[in-house]
Amino acid sequence: MLKNKNILIVGVANKHSIAAGIAKSMSGLGANLAFTYQNDRLKENVVKLANEWGSDICLPCDVADDSQIENTFKELSKVWDGLDCIVHAVGFAPREELDGNFLDVTTREGFKIAHDISSYSFIALAQAGKAMMKGRNGSLLTLTYLGSQKTLPNYNVMGLAKASLEASVRYLAASVGKDGHRVNAISAGPIKTLAASGVKNFRKMLSYNAGRAPLGRNVTTEEVGNTASFLSSDLASGITGELIYVDAGFNVTAMGSIEETES
Ligand code: NAD
Ligand code: 0WE
């Protein structure tokens, strides 16, 4: 399904990352993969995992830094003659923003960082990758969360950043459609990753979600990965500007099973 496609994956931190589930699915379907890592601390993890997925292309890229984004595509163009897909699986807000009442804890600096790293970086990657994607009917893909559309405790300024990211999926789709490229987002249900490990009561959130979701469970990074593969493949050639939920159906409910709820 992804044979001969060159795909850059941004956002692997370790084997639990959603980006790792995506890489696993895509490599299984025959894609050629390249990876970036945020910093030297994560480099070793990423190089080792990349090897398991048959890739020896690992480049440093802190998405807060334009020169590192530029360098990523400069280096990539030395080993690949073109690029078919970019997967953006990056999100960050300062920890203090994600613990407490929204109005009390949100700061100008926290807002700026959350939007820069979690939303603007997708546009920056699309711009920098444009030349390599030329003429290839490419696909751009990002990861978002329901907290963009509905409130929940503590997600706070990340909800705003994800709303911005989702709007940029639509604007980017309109912008690059004439070049033949598609732009989509996957809204994943909660998964215990590194980014989630710092979040208060995450285990309780996982069990609340599983109890209320139509499928009665949470999703896996592999399931998110398979949807990412579909969206990046020619099977999805008519889909752009779209948001697909991979959340065991949680988002369509307004109430879970009454019988299973503690009184
Ligand atoms: P993760 O911690 O495994 O991945 C987050 C990645 O972002 C890491 O690889 C980290 O290095 C990278 N990152 C952060 N700041 C960066 C920077 N300045 N430059 C470059 N990279 C940077 O966690 P994850 O849950 O796999 O997150 C991936 C994406 O999925 C995020 O956008 C997240 O918001 C989204 N998401 C996560 C969940 C969940 O419950 N885990 C649910 C829905 C959406
Ligand atoms: O998008 C995310 C992760 C967002 C995230 C998490 C952290 C923790 C550590 C962004 N920045 C940071 N910064 C840190 O310092 N998710 C969808 C997972 C997630 O995070 C939450 C959630 C869910 C779900 C935070 C609060 C409430 C729910």
Image (tube, rainbow, N blue to C red):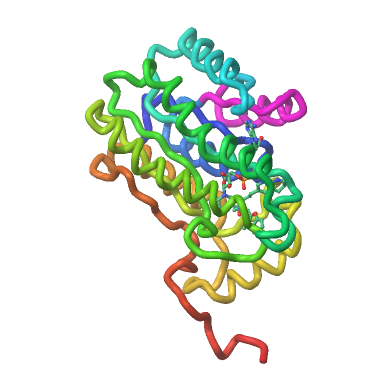
Q: How many marks?
A: 0
> Image quarter for residue 168?
top left
Residue 251 on image: x %, y %: 46, 67
Please determine whether, in this image, residue 193 is positioned above or below residue 59.
Answer: below
* Residue in the picture at 55% in, 88% down: 258
Q: Is residue 27 visible?
A: no
- Comparing 153 with 180, the one in front is 153
Q: Quadrant of residue 112?
A: top right
In the displayed structure, 69 sits above or below 46; it is above
Q: Which residues are magenta?
A: 34-56
For the point 62% across and 35% down, the residue is 12
Rendered residue at 30%/32% (across/down): 175
Residue located at (58% from left, 70% from top): 210
Q: Is residue 218 visible?
A: yes
The one nearer the camera, 44 or 209, is 209
Quadrant of the rendered image holding ligand 1 = top right
**Residue 217 x %, y %:** 56, 68
- In the rendered image, which quarter contains the N terminus? top left
Residue 157 higher or lower than 36, as above or below: below
Image spot of residue 51 (x, y percent): 62, 26
Q: Is residue 213 magenta?
A: no
Rendered location of residue 86, percent (x, y): 45, 30
Q: Is residue 48 magenta?
A: yes
Question: From the viewer's perspective, is 189 left or right of 4?
Answer: right
